Image (cartoon, helix red, strand yellow):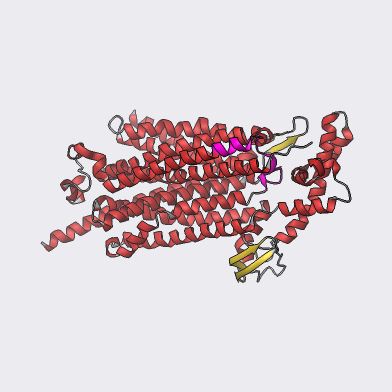
Amino acid sequence: MKAFWNFLGLLAIMILSLFLAVITGDYGPWYFAWLVGTTMIVLIAAAGAVMFEKQEEEQQGKKGSIH
Amino acid sequence: MSMMIDPTVVDLSRLQFALTALYHFLFVPLTLGMTFILATMETVYVITGKQIYKEMTQFWGKLFGINFALGVATGLTMEFEFGTNWSMYSHFVGDIFGTPLAIEGLMAFFMESTFVGVMFFGWDRISAKAHLVVTYLVALGSNLSALWILIANGFMQDPRGGTFDPNTMRMQFSNFVDLIFNVDAQAKFVHTSLAGFVTGSMFVMAVSAYYLLTKRHQDLARRSFRIATLFGVISSIGVVTLGDALGFIDVNAQPTKVAAMEAIWNTDRNTVSAPWNLIAFPSESQGRNLFEIGIPYVLTPLLTHTETRVIPGINQLVQDAKPRIVSGIQAMVALEAYNKDHADTQALAVFKANEKDMGFGFLAMQYAPDQDLKNINTTNLPSILDKTAKDTIPNVWVEFWAFRLMVASGFFMLGLFAFAAYYSLKNEMEKHPVLLKMALWSLPLPWIASEFGWITAENGRQPWTVYNWLPTFISASSHTIGYMAFSLVGFTLLYSSFIAAELYLMFKYARLGPTAHHGHDAAAAGGGMAGQPAFAKPSMDRK
């Protein structure tokens, strides 16, 4: 049942996103650019942080193997 | 038909609004940017489960909270200022201008203000995922708030969605869609929002650089530095792109602003080689630049994205305004006749034929004998045209240099973020103390750029409150000079105390670092924030 509600929730987000994309794409291209751009900025910055953790992990691994 | 208000009162009203707006905008950009940076940090926390990202969100969130509270306090007064100090403006365009402001209050401001409480106090009361949704809603709410304000501002810059009703003597809504999808509002919203992202990034980067230089809270600082630099470099590229878009839009929508911004006095028909003024000392009395350094082949493609389109110079725009002033005078005289007798269909027809220029008729009023346009005759018309036409150009010196200072700050920050992001991605930022020092000392730059950006936008709109429709000098309320001077001094003192409080609290809590945030429960939280022994553990321990 939980999966069903998750599915419905994600479906609603997808429909809303498509609606926003169509409306803003047609009438407000810069608004559309903001929606896409902000999402991209957040995701890239978050990916940078995840990459930092991976780099730290590798550094710790290297230090461990030296000792 | 005299609608004249004491020019000193108008100047004081302008100064008061400019001061309160510039004070307010010291707080706004940090809120716009920090909310999404906090959401990014919290996203990483939810994805990876690493406690340090929760601690980062809480620490930077505390600094954001100080700024948010003061931003709200300074913003509330501004909405009332439209009514108290700009009553003619509010009467003339209140139907249109008031709507986005009301939506901003009811939708965006309530949204961010409601969820910001849950964001601060809901850490232990709701699940991590629910809290993340709340943080995103705060970020969305603060930026939606900016959206509605900039839709209102877009109407002042390039009025769309309204028509003038000669029966009510006010502008009324004709199309809500035109108002919200006004291209000026669109581009300005994205430009302003991304400038806020840059401000938030610079704030986090500079404070993190301070910690790295002083070798305190390094785990938090290195992660924050990484997120801030990536956030900053992409946002900076966006700000530059949208700045270019705004220039392109204004070539059509506000040619007087563009001509003043670039100090173009004479129209250069040789569009390909037209120079872009890197430096200029404009002289309005002489109608030329006393000194200029121009870069040929740049101006036309930069502004028009073509090589053939002619950009009108100030001297040409002054001449182009004269027929519109004549038409505007006819419109206003006919409007007055129609108002005395609504059965006068001929007057209405004359007004309708010249309606698009009625703002220029308003503008000529200050030079008409007894401020009555009916007193203009063939003898005094030429001198009235000369004076009024010159008034259609904003202050060139202010416009030119405000724009350049904004652009210079913006490009410097883009370069700084690019280098900082590069070395952060290589995990080598601590090997470059000069870069860290530059990051620290560049902290004021986004605020400088934002303030000069607003000066460029609003000085460039002059002499109008609503471009080509309503002049500034008749938009103000008819207060006394004493009242305006008293309230101006009051606001200056009050807002200065707000700034002092913000700076004191920000410096205090930034210097103390995350230790002050967690206090006694640091160990209990399992994270042990920076500066504490637990924080010195390898980050992998804190999964």
Whole-percent x, y for residue B210 in the image: 30, 55
Whole-percent x, y for residue B329 in the image: 81, 44
Q: Residue at x 42, y 57 (%)?
A: B233
| Span shown in magenta | B463-487
Q: Residue at x 63, y 44 (%)?
A: B11
Q: Give residue B337's quadrant in the image.
A: top right
* Residue B468 covered by magenta stretch: yes
Specify whether residue A48 is in view. Answer: no
**Relative to residue B208, is residue B365 depicted above or below?**
above
Horizontally, residue B327 falls left or right of residue B442, namely right
For this orientation, the residue located farthest to the left is A67
Q: Quadrant of the N terminus of chain B?
A: top right
Specify whether residue B209 is in view. Answer: yes
Q: Nearer the viewer, residue B372 or B245?
A: B372
Q: Give residue B15's quadrant in the image.
A: top right
**Relative to residue B279, is residue B543 depicted above or below?**
above
Q: Residue at x 37, y 39 (%)?
A: B65
